[in-house]
Amino acid sequence: MALVHYPVKDRRGGAIATAITNLDLHDISRSALTFGASKTFVVHPVTAQRAMVERLVEHWTTGPGGRRVEDRSRAMAQVRAVASVDDALSSLGAGERAELWVTSAEGRDDQLGQGEACARLRQPGPPVLLALGTGWGLSDAVLERADVKLAPIWGRSGAGDEPGLYNHLSVRAAAAILLDRLTHTDPLEHDT
């Protein structure tokens, strides 16, 4: 998994960097560990922001937080701060090119449904980096270079069983839902 803070969009679609939040690190790393992701990357170009991540990880792994809450320590031990999406991809490769899978709340023609993505993950293949954007989502530059673009998460905010028109989730909620859907034992159950 990668929680991307740059390049992401502002509300007008411009590329910006967002600040790293403690809550995102804790919640996303716990979801990632629960559903079997091997690493959780936090992508930020600013050295001070990456240093803050390293201090938090240290506190929750070898520091007082880690001694107090062992389950949190295991999840936070998987968190790595990197300067770019490329840095995260290269650390996954182990001699083979990792695929970049991205998410977006916007529907597009070239997106793969979560059920199809789950089935694809069960097949042999290269390592996958699932990237989620903060702010108003991943920048177009990241979306355009992706190997796989996942379909948006739709709930049941509409009438009856039809998907609703509201899908403005927090990045923490989106990460947990996607990880569940991508690792579910019956992938066809989650195509909406």
Image (tube, grey):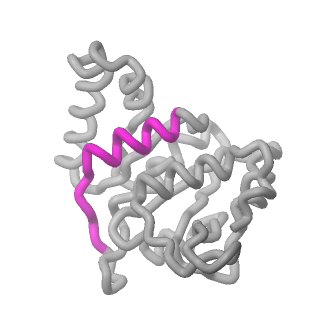
Q: Is residue 143 left or right of residue 22?
A: right
Q: Residue furthest top?
A: 67
Q: Quadrant of residue 10?
A: bottom left
Image quadrant where residue 84 sits: bottom left
**Is 52 contained in the magenta span?**
no
The one nearer the camera, 27 or 111, is 27
State which quarter of the image contains the C terminus: bottom right
- Give the vertical position of 24 relative to 66 (above or below): below
The x, y position of residue 100, in whole percent, is: 59, 58
Residue at left offset 59%, top offset 38% = 35
Q: How many marks?
A: 0
Residue drawn at x 30%, y 31% is 57
Instruction: Give coordinates of residue 109: x percent, y percent.
Output: 69, 83
Q: Residue at horizontal 80%, vertical 52%?
A: 119
- For image coordinates 46% across by 54% down, the residue present is 173
Secondary structure predominantly adopted by residues drawn in magenta: helix
Looking at the picture, tell me which residue is in the foreground, 182 or 1: 182
Seen as rendered, the residue at the extreme front is 160
Is 101 situated left or right of 173 in this image? right
Q: Position of residue 19 (x, y in %)?
A: 23, 57
- State which region is magenta: 16-33
- Residue 167, x across and y down, in percent: 50, 72
**Seen in the image, is 17 located left or right of residue 179?**
left
Residue furthest toward the bottom?
12
